[in-house]
Image: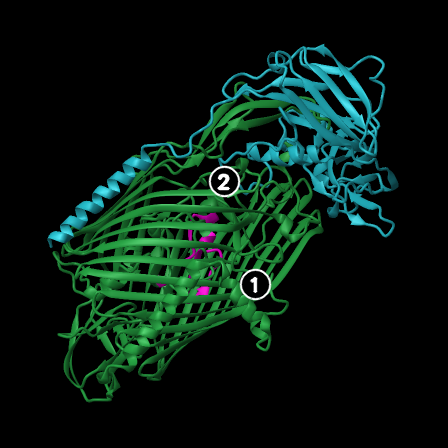
Amino acid sequence: MQSSSFTHRNLLLAGFLIVAGTGGCDLYGQDDYVEQYVVESYLIAQRPMPEVRLSRTAPFNENYYFEERAVSQATVRIHRYDENGFPDKTYLYTEIRPGVYEPQAGESSDTVLPRLTYRLDIAVPGSETHQISALTSVPDTFSVREIIRDRAIYQGPEQLEFTITRNRTNGRQIYFTYATESLDPSEENLVPFWENAVDDYMEARRIRTTIVNEENFDVNPDGTLTLRMPWIGIAFYGPNIISTFSLDDNTYDFFRSQPFQVGGGPGTLSPGEIQNVIYNVDGAIGLFGSMSVLETEVIVDRPPFE
Amino acid sequence: MFNHLNRIPYSNAPFQIQPGNPIFARTVNIQPAMAIISLFRNYFMSRFLLVALVVAGAANTASTVLPAEEMQPRAAINGYLRDAETGETLLGANIILVGTNRGGTTNNAGYYIISNIPGGTYSVRYSYLGFNDKILEVTLEEGETLRLDVQLDPVEFTMEELVVVSERDREERQNIGRASVSTDLIKSVPSVLQADVFRAVQLLPGVKAASDFSSGLYIRGGGPDQTLILLDRTTVYNPSHFFGFFSTFNPDAIKDVRLYKGAYPATYGGRLGSVLDVYNRDGNRNHHGGTLSLGMLSSRAMIEGPHGGGSYMLAFRRSTLEPLLAALRSSVDNVPDAFYFYDINAKVNFERWQNNRLSIAAYTGTDDVRFPFGDDSQFNLFYGNRTLSMDWTHLISRRIFTNVTLTAAEYFNDPVFEFGGTEFERRNRIRDYSAKADLEWLPTREFELLAGFWGGRKIFSLDDFFDGDNTLSEEIGSDYVSTYVQTIWRPGHRWKFQTGLRANYFSSGNYLRLDPRIHAEFFATSCTRFQLAYGRYHQFLTLISNEAISAFDLWLITDDGVPPSYGDQYVFGIKNSRLAGYNFEVEIYYRTMRDLFEFDPFLPDAAGLAYADLFRFGEGYATGFELFLEKTSGRLYGFIGYTWGLTRRKFDEYNQNRFYPPKYDRTHDVNVVSNFRINRRWNASAVFSYATGQAYTEPLGRSVLTTNPFDGETIDYIVVGRVNASRLPAYHRLDVGVTRTGSFFGLAESEWQLQVINVYSRRNVWFYFYDFEENPVKRIEARMLPIIPAIGYTLRF
């Protein structure tokens, strides 16, 4: 009996020691906030060289205004590499307002070339060692091969449909995003779903889908893709422009990871579990991305008995 | 806005042998031998365990062969032990030959064998929790096998000694990693809206709940998929109703609930963590009867009784929300068009033969919710399970007991969303057809051997439809076989060794895996036991589940490029029952989880991806200790359970490849469960729970995309540090309840049950979310249950 009591006492003592030892110290502590540089720039094939925005992050519990976080007097360059990977051209940038940089005069009319790689280089003011850099390979362009249907009745049996050429990039699937812009936005033209989803009809004037893989669409024998516009991508009756974007890896990574932070997207993460957005930038966070885009004008008719 | 309306959520193993053909199919082939050699090449622990297994077997053989007395023909007694009132078999009951060290325990079929008894006259004592002991005088001739089917009377109510616990039963219940939940506990503890098996299990140390809204079992650091859930020996894949709010097991239909929290024996397999083994009632063999229960959320009915050659039981439960919804529909927007769930349990037993017993059990359960939200948008959640099993128990000889079961199980989940004329649909199925056989052999009093196999075919399918097109279609059929051998050796009174080896083969991916298990136990005194156990475990499937809601649960299985998860468990336990009416238990555990595979949470679209590309792979570990103090007798009874636990996970290219705690990780977890019998009619119960706040990720910084070329909207994003490095406020809650039993006009027993959940209405925080419309960002708390009163009424006839 004595030994049993002794065992009990030892056991309890050991338990309390373990609790005190492990519960009292933080085994996995929270990091402190560290300010980071933020870049933002989008190269769109066959459009002019883009602006570059440079700023700093804000502590989460403080106000955020870009102007207050803008980083001025940085040295911003974008280098273009040819198809063999050799430096081809360097674009020097000038600050046009706090934190916003544009190609220097004379170079702003240069267009972004598809299939080429561009490199962003930024030297931040006040530091000789901190460099920001990022690479993007601009997706190939694509075009409409055939417009099968550019006019349809909203939620009718036949959808807006067109065939595009395929611009396979680096052996991977093409990642698409659609944006639809109404050319005649008005409250009367708002479709029922979007009428319910927005407070002000102008919020739906231009809408976008999340990322859709190429494999969602019909592959034709000649290698082209047939795209059918889902009705959820239409917010207004009347004329609309559908922009189909083909994304590079950087844009894909950013836009596939960002929605999960704020409760959007598919979400298999537990509520409250937040991860950083996937950035492909060295020395900063943000997005230095590229894309090619195709625009198609369509007309959506109101259902006859609405 | 639009970006939130996305498609339906898509949401180096050391033991790997991958011959070109199934290893069991080619015996005239050097490959298997080479494979087995390589299997153990770098795995000393496994080698050690196998050596231990062989030594144990050899030692047993010696003990079997050498003693001259063992060569003599000996007597034996065997039979079934039943509840005298209902005829239900009693599982885990204790049988002792008084004045000797011989004894036994009934198995999962309620059958017992005591062999190698010298001829003579004995007093045989039968005892079981909640029943009066029975002592029978028997005289045995040498070589005689006496069949003794015995019935025990339920214990009559006494104010001071409510519960009787036999030593052997206590020993069985205190096996390492083991916990039992009585159906009385399930029905008596306060539970939100209705009694629930899983809610009761969540009160045990080592078992955690994700939230007030989830009945999922998070056991010793594992997620819900790491617990094998069996109903009448058939796998149940999604055992929840009402978005996961409570389990599918109808407490009226349940006879026995056994939980193996860790280091479970080789008789089970297929999950990394634990086993919950649930048995349905067989049905009353003596007279017809039933229960009828009315509750706020659902109502239940159960009938049972004898038939010509055995017994039957049929239990039905259905939600009863429709009248409430209909009343709300006229005044409240967005009320579901349909919202119901139901489940049916049925079991028929045939026991007309002395050495054979046949039972057929079936379960079906479905949840269906159709919910329009806003104009031109709605969702339909439709999911459930079906199981069917046929179980045949056969006594081959007085020392060999066999059990053969054929099972069929199906899990289905078909959510459909429709937004603005675009439909998103998913169909996920697991169909599982299997046959299993188990054999128990008791050649000597010191040695038991169990062996068996479980083989079948799992068919997994996943189809996604977007706007009418089939965008993802996966169907993987996999044959599987697992076979095990387990020995229990008791060399003397103080030691017990249990060794086992389980081999698992899964044809999808061609994986063969071996799971050694060992368990040593030292009885220091008659009331103090020291236990040590090790086991390796493999898991060939994974559950993709959002902790917020179980209606989207998605099961996925291994295949090429997706190897099975595996892990090791080490458990040390001390069990003490020195004080009469009290049990005190301590268990310390450490477990690893490797090759964890789960759906890559950052995949926006799975269309066109190879199956292996759908996953992210990681590892984890969990450690902790559990204290359990139980009072089993007297007017006041119950238990206090405390757990200190630590769980960590790590996935490639996530959280900078650092380990992090999953949300459900709680450092401290205390549950106090008490029942007080006021008098013959009134009973009171209370449950108090306290736990460290769950892990969450604290946002540190923020930034904004201001010029996105797609829609021009600003896009906020958050900068975080370590994932889940912060803690929500501590969780605590007090639930109380009273029951009053009486008579319903002399026709039936009646019971009123009144409960108050969360008495002081502590609004525990579930998680935080953020409103980016505000500047600075506003943090909003999503809270769990407020105070909820509940009332129920039950008739037993």
Say above or below: A118 vs B359: above
Nearer to the camera, B378 or A81: A81
Query: Which image quadrant is residue A163 in?
Result: top right
Residue B757 in the image: x percent, y percent? 32, 42
Taking the magenta stretch, the answer to whether it contains residue B267 is no
Say above or below: B526 vs B324: below
Residue B396 in the image: x percent, y percent? 37, 83
Q: Nearer the viewer, mark 2 or mark 1?
A: 1
Residue A270 disc label: 2
Query: Which image quadrant is residue B232 in?
Result: bottom left
In the rendered picture of this protein, how many numbered marks are placed on residues? 2
Residue A15 in the image: x percent, y percent? 25, 43
Marks 2 and 1 belong to one chain: no
Task: Give the magenta range.
Answer: B225-254
Residue A141 in the image: x percent, y percent? 83, 35
The chain ID associated with circle 2 is A
Chain assigned green: B
| Circle 1: residue type | Ile
Which image quadrant: the N terminus of chain B?
top right
**Secondary structure state at the residue bearing disc 1:** loop
| Circle 2: residue type | Ser
Disc 1 packing (10 Å; few <14; some 14–19; many ≥20)? many
Asked if residue B251 can be seen in this view, the reply is no
Mark 2 vs mark 1, CA separation in Å: 35 Å
Chain assigned cyan: A
Q: Which residue is mark 1?
A: B17
